[in-house]
Image (tube, grey):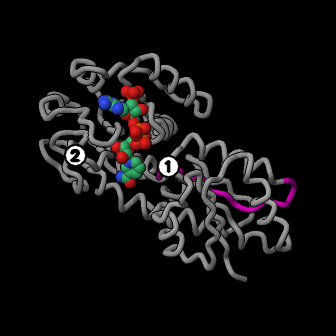
Amino acid sequence: MKSILVQLDTDPQPSVFDRVVAVDAGVDQLFSHGGATPETVESLVHGAIFTRGIPDLSRTAIFVGGSDVAAGEHVFAAVQQAFFGPMRVSVMMDSNGSNTTAAAAVLRARRHVPLAGSVAVVLGATGPVGQRAAELLALEGAHVRVGSRSVERAAETCEAIAGRVDGDLSPVATADPDGVSTALEGASTVIAAGATGVQLISAEMLKAATDLEVAIDLNAVPPLGIEGVEMTDKAVETDGVVRYGAIGVGGTKMKIHTAALKRLFDANDGVLDTEAIYRIGESLEA
Ligand SMILES: NC(=O)c1ccc[n+]([C@@H]2O[C@H](COP(=O)([O-])OP(=O)(O)OC[C@H]3O[C@@H](n4cnc5c(N)ncnc54)[C@H](OP(=O)(O)O)[C@@H]3O)[C@@H](O)[C@H]2O)c1
């Protein structure tokens, strides 16, 4: 029986990027829907769960995407609410690449630093990618410093993550160079997940962070997030710090995205959220 992926994208035009990955992951049929909202997905989900018999439901799956991660979270929840009993299909959420990118960054960091008990800093941690990276670092047992220009927003982010993961999270204000330098004191890992085109760490700050072992920058639009980390850096060690740029992490992200799509068709009850996608990435590392 052919595999069918139903792409529910919150943007008016369904993402071409996500469609290409779906095709490359071997999906036989891709049904792409743009403008998905929590109010409009129920009938689409019913179309997916009522057509094939229960034993064949594992051959249908749903992917939730789009550029607005908060909107994607609402659609992801609405999709799951439309299921009942055995009438369900597997579903994955990766709006704006947030889950796969965060998973790739943390898995890359983990290759170089034993995260449990270490200090890890996430800058731009209030954004969807940073928040997920902080969550996964906490899940790994790191002491996570959650950075934002506003300590109040950082504290709200810590609270939101603490609702999902039992971890050690502390808010740090990173509005100015002194704040960033203080946040980096004693840290082995930094993940810069700030908005595109914003430098968060200068070369001078990086040099002063003498405990750092790995620095990952997810921003691919110049100026880059960490001065001295190139976009294409992939485990490049300079001055004792292993560096990754956005493209350097991108290969791992693509592998996780593809593997997660394939995993959707293993059963009809998969829910691929931040942690589940991370665990799929972890299984690829073995
Ligand atoms: N490599 C990949 O495959 C991939 C995939 C997806 C995303 N990305 C990249 O990952 C990064 C994070 O994505 P995102 O969607 O989470 O980002 P985002 O929501 O646009 O921004 C993240 C955070 O950056 C901070 N920020 C915004 N403007 C700033 C400024 N002018 N100065 C300092 N900080 C600022 C904000 O935090 P505060 O206001 O709290 O300070 C914001 O919450 C982006 O650079 C994105 O391009 C890469």
Above or below, 72 relative to 198? below
Image position, residue 204 (x, y; %): 12, 30
User: Which residue in the rendered view is the most extreme toward the front?
Assistant: 12
Horizontally, residue 165 falls left or right of residue 129, namely right
Above or below, 172 relative to 14? above
**Which residue is at a point 59% across and 75% down the rendered structure image?**
27
Q: Which residues are magenta?
A: 84-96
Residue wearing tag 1: 67
Dot 1 or dot 2, earlier in sequence: 1
Please tell me whether mark 1 sits on a helix, a strand or a loop. loop
In the rendered image, the quadrant that contains the C terminus is bottom left
**Which residue is at a point 48% across and 55% down the rendered structure image?**
282
In the rendered image, the quadrant that contains the N terminus is bottom right
Q: Which amino acid does the dot numbered 1 rest on?
A: Ser
Tell whether position 93 is magenta: yes
Q: Which amino acid does the dot numbered 2 rest on?
A: Pro
Image position, residue 14 (x, y; %): 55, 61
Q: Is residue 107 visible?
A: no
Mark 2: few/some/many CA within 10 Å (<14, 14-19, 20+) = few
**Which residue is at a point 67% across and 48% down the rendered structure image?**
37
Mark 1: few/some/many CA within 10 Å (<14, 14-19, 20+) = some
Residue wearing tag 2: 222
Please tell me whether mark 2 sits on a helix, a strand or a loop. loop
Q: Nearer the viewer, residue 269 or 81?
A: 81
Q: Nearer the viewer, residue 40 or 238?
A: 40
Q: Which mark is residue 266?
A: none
> CA–CA distance between discs 1 and 2?
20 Å
Q: Is residue 181 visible?
A: yes
Splitting the image into four quadrants, where does ligand 1 fall? top left
User: Which residue in the rendered view is the most extreme toward the bottom?
Assistant: 1
**Which residue is at a point 54% across and 70% down the rendered structure image?**
22
